[in-house]
Image (cartoon, rainbow, N blue to C red):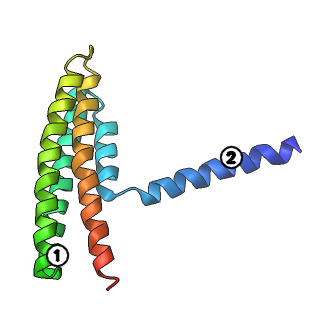
Amino acid sequence: MRLFFLPALILMVAFSFAYSQEKKDPIEVRMDAAMRDNPSTAGMLDAIAVAKREWDSRMNEDYAKLKKRMPADEWVAFVQAQKSWLAYRDVQIESLNTTYSKMEGTMWIPVRAHAEMDLTKQRAQFLKETLDLLSER
């Protein structure tokens, strides 16, 4: 029984890893690779900054696509939601800065930057999901 269990476990872990790599967005894959290539604090910050710009760019592209696809009343409501999200994001970044400024050690600098980038990533993913939803009409 043990002889069967170990190979099965190894295969499950390998398939799980391969599946998780497939599901990663190309932005995340590039960021992870850049961090592996330069794991210094500066290298991680650079990789995160690039990823944040890419998520922001994707978000703006999808925002423009949504504008073209939404009727006027829906677009007005969406613009208001986006403005509210921008205000939330800005306050959340202030909160992150306050929290992480009290942490000791340079390891927290890229952790804070990643948390900030994640806000934009999540909104970009939401806009993409909204575009996908509109295609169901």
Q: Decide: marks 2, 1 in contact (CB < 8 A)?
A: no
Residue placed most toward the observer, 15 or 115: 115
Q: Amino acid at mark 1?
A: Glu
- Outermost residue toward the bottom? 137
User: What SS does tag 1 mark?
Assistant: helix
Residue 90: x and y, percent?
12, 41
In space, the residues marked 2 and 1 are separated at their CA atoms by: 50 Å
Residue 75: x and y, percent?
13, 73
- Outermost residue toward the right? 1
Residue 78 found in image quarter: bottom left
Residue drawn at the location 12% of the way across and 77% of the way down: 73
Residue drawn at the location 28% of the way across and 42% of the way down: 34
Q: Residues within 10 Å of mark 1 (few under 14, many from 20)?
A: few
Residue placed most toward the observer, 78 or 64: 78
Q: Residues within 10 Å of mark 2 (few under 14, many from 20)?
A: few
Q: Is residue 88 above or below residue 76?
A: above
Residue drawn at the location 10% of the way across and 80% of the way down: 72
Residue 101: x and y, percent?
19, 20
**Which residue was labeled with disc 2?**
10
User: What SS does tag 2 mark?
Assistant: helix
Quadrant showing the C terminus: bottom left
Residue 81: x and y, percent?
16, 60
Q: Is residue 123 above or below residue 98?
A: below
**Which residue was labeled with disc 1?**
74
Q: Amino acid at mark 2?
A: Ile
Residue 40 found in image quarter: top left
Q: Is residue 46 above or below residue 72?
A: above
Quadrant showing the N terminus: top right
- The numbered mark, 2 or 1, whose residue comes first in the sequence reads 2
24 displayed left or right of 11: left
